[in-house]
Image (cartoon, grey):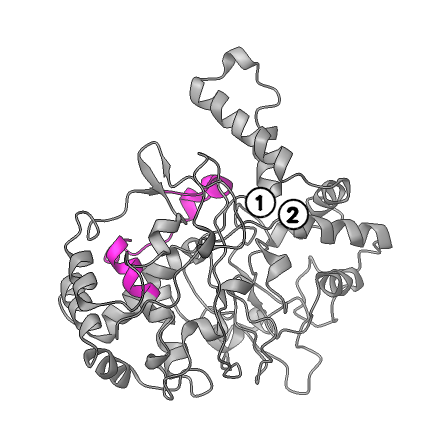
Amino acid sequence: MNERVAIRVVSIFAILLSALGCDQSAPASSSTRKEPISEWRNGRIVLGSPSLTSGIPGDGALTIDQIRDWLSTDGIHEPLDFVLPVGLVDATELITIPHDNPLTRAKIELGRQLFFDGRLSDFRTTACATCHLPEQDYSVHGVMPVSALNPPVCFNRLFGGRQFWDGRAESLEDQVEGPITNSFEMGTTPDECVARLRSIEGYQLQFQAIFGELNFDAVSRALANFQRALVTGPSPWDYRRLLSQYEDRAVDSLSPEERLRVRQLKQGVSVYSMSESAIRGEALFFSDRTRCHVCHSGPNLTDEAYHNVGTGMADDEPDLGRFDITQNEQDRGAFKTPTLRNVARTSPYMHNGQFDTLREVVNWFDRGGYDHPHLDRNVRPLNLTRDEKRDLVAFLEALTGALPPVETARLPQ
């Protein structure tokens, strides 16, 4: 099965990263949300900071002189010394970065350009961003799929190894070839993609300086770097749960840094508070009754594993999912658990885009999905009340954190 979506030209807008820290504000032109940002913590760059995705400095068309100046900037070719946004600090152990492709500013910026460049596609109109829309948190809401699969979001992929709903790509680097060669997406070939990039001087300069040559492996590595820089900022739930860790601590037992953190978290809770309904939904989500947290586990709210939850199994030709890769009978109809971060902004839902709203998703699991021999044992009728369903949706909405603003227009000419 291919992850195919209709070609659609879209305009791209950025949204601002929300994080703890200083009073600096992003330029009004880069965001519709003016929130405090903090690019540094203890001398290390916070992943998701605006400067990592805001493009090569300058205005108007990206010129060769600007690219040359950028490539000579101190430190941009060095491995990035980074920390995670506050809401994801406990996800450090989940970070997946190949040893031969460390994050650097230069590679992130090159990957950013490639991500928004339609010239990589057959008709020079379809970019990665055509189906992963930044203004819709890298989802495809409003773009009707032309196959059974709904493209997964591409943020927080720093915390996963295998890619796609069925895990057929071992890494973000391996994932790149799929959409570029798929005739229903970008519809070209690795060789043609490289040939087009070689015809653009600005790309030639960057690939030579960063990778030593321009080939498809370098294209894949640059795009993977950019995607790993797309991480979610803290959500209302993060502020609340992190502050709760200090509830039993006496003030005089806190270090100066911890006291500062508590003040910041309290401010976050005050500004981005959870409703009483969301708080009830949180308790329900993590209860033994619903067991939502069994699959949507960890700081990124996914176990990165594959489960059959019944979607797509009622069709005449049911979706086989992970089974197509492993040929393991237990994987029949199983698809990867998606992150629930920013889920309120990333409809449609499920691997096949079956549901448009979170209420529909909750109703599906409340019914126990679609009966199937390989249905995951945690999917069973829940008999939720109307208010409990409303509370679960409110909690899911409280998992929304801002993504970094991103420059979309400045590309090599």
Figure check: 293 above or below 204: above
Q: Secondary structure at mark 2?
A: loop
Q: Which residue is under mark 1?
A: 235
Q: Position of residue 305 (x, y in %)?
A: 53, 59
The residue lying at 14 percent from left, 70 percent from top is 213
Q: Which element is circle 1 on?
A: loop
Dot 2 amino acid type? Ala
Q: Residue at 69% across / 83% down in the picture? A: 315
Question: What segment is highlighted magenta in the picture?
Answer: 83-112
Label 2, label 1: how many angstroms apart (C-alpha)? Answer: 6 Å
Task: Provide residue 96's location: percent of width, then percent of height.
Answer: 37, 53
90 part of magenta stretch? yes
Assess disc 2: are there few (<14), some (14-19) or many (≥20) residues with their C-alpha within 10 Å of its C-alpha. Answer: many
Which residue in the protein does label 2 denote? 398
Q: Amino acid at mark 1?
A: Ser
Examine the rendering and report whether any part of residue 256 can be seen: yes
The answer to whether the residue labelled 2 contacts the one labelled 1, judged by CB atoms less than 8 Å apart, is yes
What label sits on residue 111 in the rendered view?
none
